Every structure is written in structure tokens, then in C-alpha cells.
Amino acid sequence: MTDRPPFHSSDIPAKPGVYVFRDRFDEVIYVGKARDLRRRVSQYFHPSRVTKADPKTRSLINSIAKWECYPVRTEAEALLLESRYIKQYAPRYNILLRDDKRFYMIKIHLNERFPRLSLARVRKDDGCRYYGPFPQTGALPQTVEFLRRRFQLRLCKLADPDAETRKHCMDVRVKLCCGPCVGTISEADYRKRVEELVAVLEGDVRALVERLEEEMRAAAAALDFEKAAARRDMAQNLSEIFGARNRNFRFASIPSAAGTAATEDLQQALGMKRRPDAIEAFDISTLGGQASVASLVRFVDGKPDRAGYRRFRIKHVDGVDDFAMMDEVLRRHFKRKLEEGSQMPDLVLVDGGKGQLNAALKALVDLGVPALPLMGLAKRQEEIFLPGRSEPLVLDEHRPALRLLRAVRDEAHRFAVSFNRELRDRKIKESVLDDIPGVGPERKKALLIAFGSVAKLRHASAADIRAKVPGLGEHTAAAIVKWLEVLR
């Protein structure tokens, strides 16, 4: 048997969690989950297991040189963490979960004019918001379908349906959709529905569950027991999937126990005096110097702290200059922190290499910010740049520290890109009216209020425009129609 440290069951908590076995080459050879880590891991070290177990288990036991335990709060969370580790390490002794099956996530297409709801198995950097993953895959599709119908969100997959596709849409007629594309509901009212749905996905289910229970009692009183049972089951599904005990699954992020392990590993990797429990990360997004923006995301204990997210418009830099933009954003953010006496992060991460790192360092020094751990993370080779070091630090791709840094960096990038896209789309939609003769700021505002968007205004006749915008002359209305026809 491979030499290994003596096993003491008292060193392992009697809690749900995931255990990892490594061989003498430090390779992960097995990942398992348990309701009680102490009891489950102890079973592998009973003398009888070596002689009575099947050949595969005996081979596994004889190969164990190290073990790690990651306690979590619930068995469902342990299942998610086990699945993630198995996919990441592909241990040779694991058979179950070695396929590429993934748990469902709920996806809200916030990058679309009228956001819709769908299911996804893979998180993409596409400007959408993801909730999950959810191990309760059995009830999730029916629950998502219920939420679509309850809030009457659109079901069509087109980003912005045109007049032709609307003619053939049956969802509005059968009241599955509230009809934002045909003007049945305003864009602002549709967004309110989306916000109410988001609140449910983030755990605020009490009001909806209470309404369903009221409908259940009313249906039962009317002897409609089938409807009553459906309302009862859906209320239970909502509570089980989105309720308080499962809120740790709201976002596809690092579980709490794994997050703590990752911050400890990061402390060791960077040689920090204290554990980086609070990390703030910055990223720049620009397209040819247009709509240049920056993002700030904050992670606490390895998980996103969305209350600490911030978005910045670049105000003082013209053209494409990432270094100057990084300098501006850090000066603005940390100047405010100093003025307000806010708590400083344990680690500051900037997306980029030496240039971005030096710009950030200069900004902090010029402001007189107390010494903070600072690092840059380059995308290409995942190189870590630190002040005072000429050569980058490269971590093993399997280390929890690097996985945490990637998660933070990628979230900052996603947040910046989504803001950049939002500003560009807004500018494109609204600036079309700026050059129309006779349309000043007030008339432009009145047109957008009356029609909701330039897309709807394109399909209006001069008579429609005059009817909806009082005081607009016949000549100006005709000029608007002609101008928009030219731009089609």
C-alpha cells in the first residue's frame, strides 16, 4: 500500500460534502459525495474493506495517498460540487457522472428588447442572466413553463420580431403572451413583469406561493380538484426550487465551501498575509473608442456579491487607451471609497497584463490608498502579474485559486461587455431621430414616448404620427416617415 498520513476520523466533519482522493503523483483518482463525510470516508479505511471489497475498490484504496474533504450545507449542494469536480478532473475510478450531463440553468435573455425565459445547460458570455444550476431537474421544465405563462412572457425566439412574423403569432390570441411586440403592453410594463419574475428566481416566492394556495382553495371549493392539485404541486415546486434553503443555487458560481478553499489556496499562491475574502475586479470594454465603459464586480467568500457591482462610463479618455481608462476608473472608485470611509477589498484584480497593472498601481499610489494586494490576470496564458515581479506567475490549471480568479475575471468581463452593448444599442436606436429636420429634443422625446421605440415608429404612417403626437405638423410627420424609409 502507498505510504500516506495516518487516518483520523475526528479530523473530518460529520457534515454533508464532497471528498477527493489523490494518488502519490497528486492526481485526483476519485471524487465522491456523502451525507456524512466522517462516516463515508472512514469506510474506505476499515481493514475489512481491503480484503472484502471488489477489485476496483481495493485498487482504489491501495492507490490513495491523500484525501481532501469539502463540507457543504446540503446534499443537493454536495451533488452539484461532486458533478463539477468529476467533470473537471475526470478521475479514473469514477464511473457515474463521467458523461457530460449537466444540470439545468434558467436563462433570462436580458440583452433582448423584450426579455424571454428559457432553460440552458451551458453558461455563455452572451449578456444573458443565468440562475442555477438546479439539481431538481425533474420539476424544473414544468416550473419554467408555468412562470412563462404566469407572467405572460413571449415565447418566440426572435430577438426583435418584425411585422410579418407578428401576423402569424398565435400566442397573443390564446393569451400565452402579453403581446409587447404588437403594442398590447408597453415596453416599460413588460420590463416590470420581467423584474417581478427575477425577484421570484432570486428567492422572493412567498407572495406567488400564497396566491397559488388561494387559487387552490378556491378550486377545491368549486370541486375542481384537478386544478386544485395542479396549484398545490406548483406551489411546492416553487418553494423547493427557489425557496430559502436552495438560494445557494441562484447563480452558477462557486459553492461556499469550495469558495473558502479557493480563497485559502489563493492566499498561499500569492503569498498574502490575510485571506482574500473580498475581491474587487475591474475590466474595460470599448469598441473602437465608442461607448467605452468599465465594470467593477465584487466577490465575497468566492461568490458574487452583486450589491457591490458598479458600472462606469469613461469620461476623460478619448480613443482606445486601456491603460488610461483603467487609471481613470480606479481613481474614481477608490477616491469615493476614501471620501466615504468605505472598507477596502482584500485583493484588487485588473483584467490585463503589466500595462493595466502599472496603471492601476499608479492610480492607487497617487490617491494615497493604503497598501492593497494588487494583481493583473492576462487572458491568453492565464498569467498572473504582481507588482515588483518581472516574470508572471503561472498556476496549475487545476488549482482552486486559478479557478476562482477565472470566475472573477470572466464575471467582470461579462458585466462590462453587457453594459457596452446596452449603451451602443441605446445610441443606435435613439440617434436615428437626431438628424431629422424639424425634430428637436422635445419632439424626439414625445415620439419615443408615443411609440415606445424607433422600431415601432418605422411602421407608422404620417397620419399615425400626427394622431399620437399632438402639435406635430403634416410636413414634419411626412419628413419623419420619409427619413426612416431611407434608413431601412
Image (cartoon, helix red, strand yellow):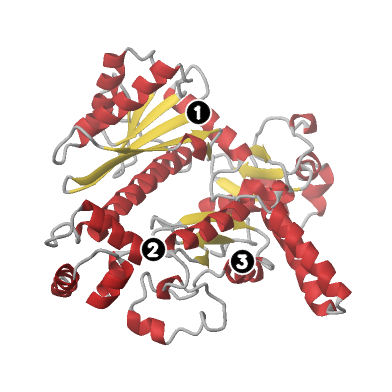
113 in relation to 164, above or below: above
Circle 2 or circle 1, nearest the eye: 2
User: Could you give the CA–CA distance between mark 3 and mark 1, rounded to whole angstroms?
Assistant: 35 Å
Residue at left offset 30%, top offset 49%: 420
Q: Residue 370's x, y, as percent?
A: 39, 13
Q: Is residue 289 visible?
A: yes
Q: Nearer the viewer, mark 3 or mark 1?
A: 3
Q: Amino acid at mark 3?
A: Leu
Residue 55 visible in image: no
Quarter holding residue 169: bottom left
Q: Which residue is mark 1?
A: 278
Residue at image coords 29%, 50%: 423
In the image, taking residue 101 as reference, residue 482 lies left or right, namely left
Q: Is residue 386 left or right of residue 89?
A: left
Specify the amino acid type for callout 2: Arg
Q: Secondary structure at mark 2?
A: loop
The residue that label 3 is drawn on is 147
Q: Residues within 10 Å of mark 3 (few under 14, many from 20)?
A: some
Instruction: Find the distance from the CA under tag 2 to the CA under tag 1.
Output: 34 Å
Circle 1 Cα neighbour tier, 10 Å, few/some/many (<14 / 14–19 / ≥20): many
Counting residues from the start of the chain, the first of labels 3 and 1 encountered is 3
Q: Nearer the viewer, residue 306 or 123?
A: 306
Lower sequence index among marks 2 and 3: 2
Q: Secondary structure at mark 3?
A: helix
